[in-house]
Structures are given as C-alpha cells and as structure tokens.
Amino acid sequence: MAACLWLNTLDALFMFRLVSLCFLTMLIAFPANGEMQGERERPYRSDGEQIHAQCERLLQQKGSPGGTAKELLAIRLDRFYSGGGYQPLWTNRQRVDELIEALEESAADGLNPSDYDLIKIRQSVADTLVSPEKKARVDILFTKAYLTLATHLRYGKVDPVTLEPYWKRPEKRGLGVLDETLQRTLASGSITAVFKELRPQDANYDRLKKGLARYSAIANLGGWPRLAEGAVLKEGSRDRRVAVLRKRLEVSGALVMASADTSTVYNREMVEAVKKFQSRNGIDVDGSVGPTTFRVLNVPVEQRLDQIRVNLERYRSFLHDLPPTCILVNIPGYYLQYIENGRSQWGSRVIVGQPLRQTPVFGAAMHSLVFNPKWVVPRTVLDKDVLPALNKDNSYLAKKQLRVVNEEGGTVDPASVNWSQYSAANLPYHLQQRSGDKGALGRIKFLMPNPLAIYLHDTPGRELFDKSSRAFSSGCIRVQNPAELARLVLRDSLGWSRAKIQEAINTGKTTMVTLPQQIPVFLLYFTVVPNGEELLFREDIYNRDKRALQLLKSSTSGSQVCREEK
C-alpha cells in the first residue's frame, strides 16, 4: 500500500512539472500582443524576400513627412524591383563606385549631394559586417539615390508649377520610360553616360556649370572686396576707393592687370573695365560708378553662386523639351530669341510687364499676326489706368484716341456715360483705339491664344528700348523690331518679304495673316544667362529667385522628385 502511495505521488509530481513546463513554453511563445515571437523574428529566406518586405513597408508609410513625394517614390521603387523579382541591384562594386561619383558630381550642377544620402551611402560601402535586413535597406538606399538624381537631372528638383502656376507640364512626363532606361543601364550600361544624357543638351547649360565652378573658386579664395560708400566716381576722379575697385574688377575678370597698380586715379582703363562690368550686369553703360553700379559691385560672390544654382535648375525644368523651332523671351533679360532648327537665328530687345503687372511664365502657340491692329483696352488697364483717369479728365479718351463701343459694335458718345458708376467688371462698353503709329499696339500684333490675354506687339514708345531696364508694360511683350519677327514667322510664305510686309503696313488696313505653321512661344525667367564664356547677371525684377532658392535647398518642399505621369 505504501509503495502504491509513493508511486502515485511521483506521478503527480511528474504531471505537475509537465504542466508547468507547457505553461512556460506557452508564455514564451505567446507574448502579450498575441503575436508568435518565433514567427515575428523568423529571418526571411532570401535577399529577394528582404527587399520585397522593405518595399512593402515603404508603400505602407502613408502620411509621413514628405507626403505624396515619398509615396510616389515608394511606388517607383517597388516597380523598379518587381521586374527583377526583387533581387539586389547593387552587387557590382563598379556600379556602386559609378553611382557615388555621380552623386558627388551633382554639386557641379548646383544640386546638393546630401539630397541623395551620399554620406550614408559612403558609410554603407565601408561597413562590411551587415545583416541580411540591413543589406536590403542599403540596396534600396542606392536605388533611391539613383532614381532621385536621375529625375532631378531630367526634370529638375523643384516642381516648376510650384513657382510658376501658369506653366503647363509637358504631357506624359515619362517617368516609366525613364525608369526603364535606368534599369537597362544597371544591367549593361554606364551610369555616368546615362546621367550625362539626362542633363539638358544645351551648350549654355554647360557654360552655366563652368561659371558655377569659376565663381566657386573665387568664393574659396575669399571672394571680392567690398567698396565703401562715397561720391560718384567719374573719369579723372581721385579716391582711395579706386584701389579697392581695381581689385574688385580684377577678381571678377572685368579687368586684367599687366602689373601691380596702386594709383588712386579713376583712369580710362578703369572706366572701360567698369563699362564691361555694367554691360555684364544689365546696368546703363556710362563708365561711372554711381548708386546702381555701386550696389551691384557689392553683391557678394555667395549670392551670385546661389543665383547660378537657381538658373541651372530653371534650365532643367523649362529648357529640356523645347521644340527645335520656337520663340524664347527672357523676361528679366528683356530679350527675345527666334530659334530655328535648334539654333538662335535672330534676337530683339523687348519690354515686359511692370513688377505690379508681371509678365507670367508660360507657353502658347503663335498662329497668326495682325497688321495695323486695333487695341481693345483690357480689363486690368481699364481698372487701374483708364477709369481713374476718366474720372479726373473728361478729355482723356480724346487724347488717347479711344472710342466707346457698345456690344453691337456701335459708337457711343462718351459724354453720355456716367463713368463714376462703372468699374472694369460691370462696364457695358469696350474702349477701342484706332490702329496707327500712335496706337498702343503699333503696326503689328502677334496672336498666341491663351487665357491670360498675353501677346507680342509693336509699340509707339520706341525710346524705351534704349533703357537698360525695360519693365514698363501691363504684361504683354513689346518687340523692338516687329517687322523682322513677322518676316521670320511668316517664313516668306506667299511672298511675305520685307517689302511686302511694309506694303501691308502702309495700307493702314487691319489685316490678319495666318502663319504657315504654328510656332511655340515660351515666356521664361532667367536672371543669369551665358554669353560665350561670360555670365550675364540680370536684376531679379519680380523677386522670384529667393523662393526658387528656398525650394532648391529644401529636402522635400515643392519637390517633383517622383511625380507620376497621369
């Protein structure tokens, strides 16, 4: 009996220990959150699974800082890897070295290598002991940098519509095509070569890059000296500041000194150097150092570097997909170029909108022109100029040769209208100016339909073209030599020679002529433009560089790094 009791006791102890062991096992296997710890920590069986999991995690990170840009980049990454079964893409060390070199060289394009995690990439290359999970993260890090830099070079970093709301994106931005090209390059091409092809294929872009390098070298050597305030310097002036001015001009390349000169006399050689500086900077060329020239001389080299970077970005954003034949107007440069078969064939000075009535950045197609056009006063001019003037001077309409026209086209006696009760929004009449040399549109108007009612035209105010700063219009573009532009866009079709154009003008009749082929017109905004190996700096008349620079320096704001085609 005692033996049986002893055996029963042993059985009970064994069962107790067995139950306890099972209970402890369950506690370990089932943590408080209810997940199987063994399942959660199970390593993925392949590199492909690791990368697939990382891509899935990125796709699920919605609402994180960076917003839509990060979400769209995640979509591109997943698409980029899925075609190859999510296998690692950066197992070739030569490819990795090529990528790192390209990221480093992005600074020469005015971009910031830190936008592409260059430091992290360098560290990852040096780190030889990595887990499979980290290995997948590093591979994706490389691909992110690859896609991002390629997109920045091809389309620009900053979404141009963020800065220029009237600019229309080209149809089908082609990110899918771009990614296919990048995939093929990783498989059997040169990263260096494909990045070179993605940059704007424009000699002026390369000249801007050279200018950036040149001004960077000046900055690294301490920049140029700053002039103290003082009297206007004219030829023959004696002033201690002349030595500082000489050094300032020498550093920026406007003056080449054969030997050291410590003279305080503002001599002929200095006058010519200042004229060269004024021409480069869009200042009235008179050779004297007055307030405007003094102010521009004291712009620091760091500001010029930022200006060059902003305009490199504008080249990437706006000048990548231009048709071979088009018209370009640089608003702050007050200049128009006629481009034919990819080469500048002709140029003209222009007058652009005042800072309070800015000429917008946009594109439209010119389809016709009008000889001896009549001018219908636009709403903006009515509201800000004509109606206020009419309320002060009853003879204003007669002075400007404007007639009042009703909806039926009939002429209305201006004395019968109570002008004080109307605004531009509710005026039931049009104000029309006869054509002629004194008409606001001059003798030729170039039509390029757009919702902003902006067009190119002649002007009776010829004297304004002699000024270095020419922001005088209400938004439209006044062309210095419209007859020659007419000859170029008509392409001598139907015998439109210079003589035939002048004959049409001399008739005084309003005549519309359809162009043989529509010509794209682009109104753009560049405050730095190359002229040979020199850079021409222009006044930021609409104060747009600051905002553009902020977005260019930002890591995410305004970025178009991964906008998908619609």
Image (cartoon, helix red, strand yellow):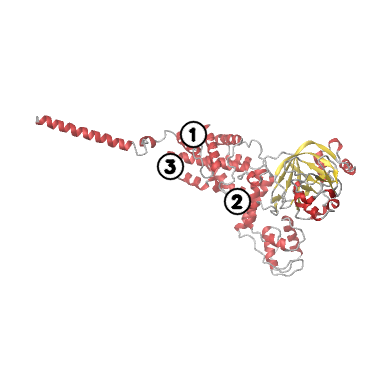
- SS state under label 3: loop
Label disc, if present, on residue 550 of the rendered structure? 2
Front-most of residues 520 and 88: 520
For the residues bearing labels 3 and 2, Cβ distance under 8 angstroms: no
For the residues bearing labels 1 and 2, Cβ distance under 8 angstroms: no
Quick one: label 2, few (<14), some, or many (20+) residues within 10 Å? some
Please report the residue visible at 75 percent of the width from the left and 50 percent of the height from the top.
383
Sooner in the amino-acid sequence: mark 1 or mark 2: 1
The amino acid marked with disc number 2 is Gln
Label disc, if present, on residue 130 of the rendered structure? 3
Camera-nearest label, 3 or 2: 2
Please report the residue visible at 76 percent of the width from the left and 47 percent of the height from the top.
477
Camera-nearest label, 1 or 2: 2
Would residue 70 be seen by someone viewing this image from the given angle?
A: yes
Label disc, if present, on residue 87 of the rendered structure? 1
The amino acid marked with disc number 1 is Gln
Residue 38: percent from the left, percent from the top? 36, 35
- SS state under label 1: loop
Label disc, if present, on residue 12 of the rendered structure? none
- SS state under label 2: helix
Q: CA distance from mark 3 to mark 2?
A: 37 Å
